Amino acid sequence: MNAHERQKIILQLIAEKGSVTVSELCERFGVSDMTIRRDLSLLEKASLLRRIHGGAVSARGRSYEPPVLARIQEARPAKQAIGRFAARLVHEGNSIALDIGTTTLELARQLTRMRDITVLTNSLPIANILTDQPGIRLMLCGGIVRPGEHSMIGPVAEYTFSRFYVDTAFIGIGGVDVEAGLTEYNLEDAEVKRHMIHNSQRCILLTDSRKFGLKTFASVAPLSVVDEIVTDDRLDPAFRQRLEKMGITVHIVSVEETD
């Protein structure tokens, strides 16, 4: 396979998955990491992708967020495994804030088995899953419904999260970067997340490995606010080491994990 064919496949993989890593490309093509890095550099110069630590992502703008219905299918096995693990971190009697996002949505599916917990959320899809669950006291933050994302935004949502103090906030995110911290595609969603994090005793980030090294449009908070991260086993080991040196507990789940 020549370089042109290899680069065409790399772009196809990014279009399908949103991101690729150098290690997975080396394994797929049976070439050295130097060869892959050269391919990625050429494609970045052509504005066809954007390089990040350990791989590359789509060259779409930082404020562009794919519709939630499209994101549900992206990296779904990883998100399901993350959701299953995160449910083990919720205990009877807990109060939790549950953020918007397709990974937190997978956690919500697992919470239907729980008893005697309080869930405060700004996500209509999550509310639909948890409505009428006998063991869950469900609270919606109110606010303006953001079309497409079905999240609650605006002053009412921000005020609600500023008035309640929860045991744990489970946060979804657009991007995770050591320097930039937590970032989000939408400014209004970022503002709500800040209030959610501020009033939680513990902040747990739920995100698949594609988000690491990615900077999106709006700053949410520095990584220092995060106590724990649950992610999949494709996270770059070097990135994990940097996170752990910052005092963050990183839980790695296998995408093959089953109930």
Image: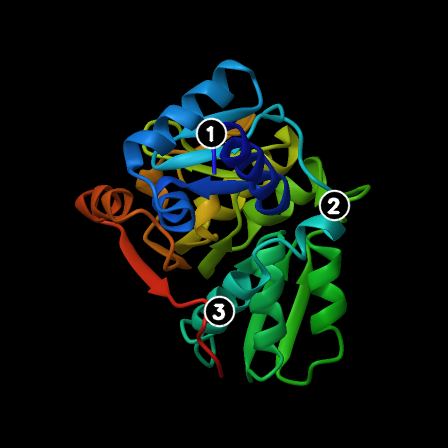
Q: Is residue 126 visible?
A: yes
Depth check: give the residue in front, 240 or 121. Answer: 240
Local crowd size for mark 1, using a 10 Å CA cut-off: few (<14), some (14–19), many (≥20)? few
Local crowd size for mark 3, using a 10 Å CA cut-off: few (<14), some (14–19), many (≥20)? many
Q: Amino acid at mark 2?
A: Glu
Mark 3–mark 2 Cα distance, whole angstroms, equals 22 Å
Q: Disc 3 marks which residue?
A: 81
Would you place residue 129 above or below residue 140 in this image? below
* Picture residue at 62% right of the left edge, 29% below the top: 187
Q: Is residue 165 visible?
A: no
Q: Which label's residue is closer to the chain start, 3 or 1?
A: 1
Q: Seen in the image, is 62 located left or right of residue 241?
A: right
* Picture residue at 58% right of the left edge, 84% below the top: 113
Q: Amino acid at mark 3?
A: Ala
Q: Disc 1 marks which residue?
A: 3
* Residue 3, image x, y percentages: 47, 29
Badge 3 marks a residue whose secondary structure is helix
Would you place residue 135 above or below residue 187 in this image? below
Depth check: give the residue in front, 18 or 72. Answer: 18
Q: Disc 2 marks which residue?
A: 149
Mark 3–mark 1 Cα distance, whole angstroms, equals 35 Å
Q: Which label's residue is closer to the chain start, 2 or 1?
A: 1
- Residue reaching furthest to the front: 1
Local crowd size for mark 2, using a 10 Å CA cut-off: few (<14), some (14–19), many (≥20)? some
Q: Seen in the image, is 250 located left or right of residue 115?
A: left
Q: Seen in the image, is 54 located left or right of residue 61?
A: left
